[in-house]
Amino acid sequence: MRYLNLTLKLIITIAIVVGCSSKENLRPSILIQNATIVDGSGADGYVGSVRIIDDLITAIGDLDVSYADSIIDGTGLVLTPGFIDTHSHHDWDTLRTVDAAISQGITTIIVGQDGSSRSSLGDYFDSLTTYPLSVNIASYIGHGSVRREVMGDDFKRQATKEEIEVMKLLVETSMKEGALGISTGLEYDPGIYSTTEEVIELAKMVSQFGGRYISHMRSEDIHLEQSITEILRIGKEANIPVQISHFKIARRGLWGQAGRILERLDSARTAGIQITADIYPYQYWQSTMTVLFPKRDFDNRESAEFALSELTSPEGMIIARFNAQSEYEGLTLAEVAILRNEDPVTTYIELIRMSQEMPGESIIAKSMDLEDIKTLTNWEFTNICSDGAPRGHPRGWGAFPHYLNMDTGITFERKIHKMTAQAAENIELDSIGIIKVGYYADLLLFNPDRFEDKATFKEGQLRATGLNMVIVSGRVVYQKQRPTQVYAGRVIRN
Ligand SMILES: [Zn+2]
């Protein structure tokens, strides 16, 4: 009887163990087979399979099919990590699919840029946890948003010591709520009126939480060199990793000097400052009409003339949005000047005046040299971003495939690296950006010969073509040129 009992116990134990292990095998998995795996590290691609269970990559290589596998055939396609957009405005989209991002292969957006963010990241992250997007999201706290909260409309001056102390408390709260760090927009109101010392004080607070600093610098044209000096000083004195965002040389007189500027950054790195950059691959930027007036002297003809000759041109400035007279939208400044029977400088000054009476304007303007863009993107510590939004500049719907199709003199694998693992490294996120066991299954499947951006300056909201599939957290969020209405995006907190 005793032996029988023991035998029974043994049988039950074996049954439980077998039961457990077969249960393990029964967990549904996805097997992507026969794809060329370009893993994001920059290494050459190789043909193989990748298995996903839940939201993670669990196996890579020459894998046998298990009965729990749903098979995706990757024959003739490349499998890469999803793209990481380190400077995004895609959160302006009201649809949870974030179509502009996923249709170009972006699976993680980093928002709260240019000094502008939601004031309470905690509430925002909570709402996204309840109602996730199709893409992953992380956010900086915006210096400008904090400054405005403390100083209100009285921001056209230096902040007092007491005001900076209050700003520090707000930054501290945001860091505790999961901000990646702080972003500044020092070429915009209200950031333009801050001193470097104010920024350093706030950056020191961020540094205490292991956060980072990203900046739309004080100048990208006239005072570019001084702006670089400023960001390096912030990195050094606040002991914080710093990133130049949408890196550009937007002044004609500085074109061709990208190599020399990068030498400055390299020697700063040698001296211990952790500086990196991101960039979007276009000669045109998008911003406000007033951004080209660092002295804020909008009615000064000399300043307007300088902007239209040295920083951009009447033919190279497209009116993207203009609430005061919407029929100007889509035209260049040169075309508007002809319509109004004026010279372009007069028109420029007049349009700014009109937009101050009826706010709401945006321009797309050509200021960058293609060779500089190539040199800056090829820097070892540069990753690709879109700086894109659901409307406006074609980068919003096309930056990443646009870059892939650009001839910059580096391999396809290096380009993928700059859109994935390099981005993750620059913003210090582990577990995404590379195809590796244990990493999140954020993946793209496409034919590199067919993957193309379609958005243009006239039609900015066209989906890229040739992207077969986008997977976020192990779930298909985009397929056959359409969002699948699956919301698998994670909130990434610092
Ligand atoms: Zn910016």
Image: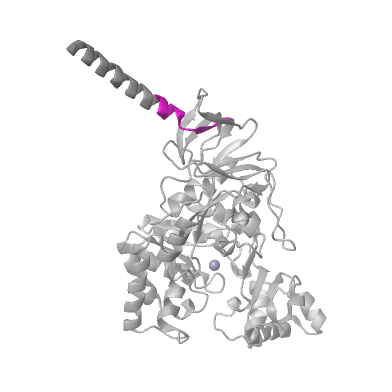
User: Percent from the top left, x then y, of residue 465?
Assistant: 70, 47
Quadrant observed for ligand 1 in the rendered image: bottom right
- The answer to which of 18 and 150 lies nearer the viewer is 18
- The answer to which of 265 and 117 lies nearer the viewer is 117
Q: Can residue 31 be found in the magenta stretch?
A: yes
Residue 427 falls left or right of residue 204: right
Q: Residue at x 62, y 55 (%)?
A: 99
Q: Can residue 205 be found in the magenta stretch?
A: no
Q: Quadrant of residue 309?
A: bottom right
Q: The C terminus is located in which quarter?
A: bottom left
User: Percent from the top left, x then y, of residue 220?
Assistant: 55, 69
Residue 43 falls left or right of residue 395: left
- Residue 182 in sight: no
User: Percent from the top left, x then y, of residue 178?
Assistant: 38, 60
User: Percent from the top left, x then y, of residue 424?
Assistant: 46, 50
Q: Which scheme is used to colour this image of the protein?
A: one colour
Examine the rendered structure and indicate whether residue 234 appears above or below residue 441: below
Examine the rendered structure and indicate whether residue 355 appears above or below residue 428: below
- Give the residue furthest to the front: 1
Q: Residue at x 52, y 57 (%)?
A: 278
- The answer to which of 86 and 271 lies nearer the viewer is 86
Q: The N terminus is located in which quarter?
A: top left
- Residue 424 in sight: yes
- The answer to which of 397 and 313 lies nearer the viewer is 397
Residue numbers of the magenta segment: 22-33
Residue 119 falls left or right of residue 16: right
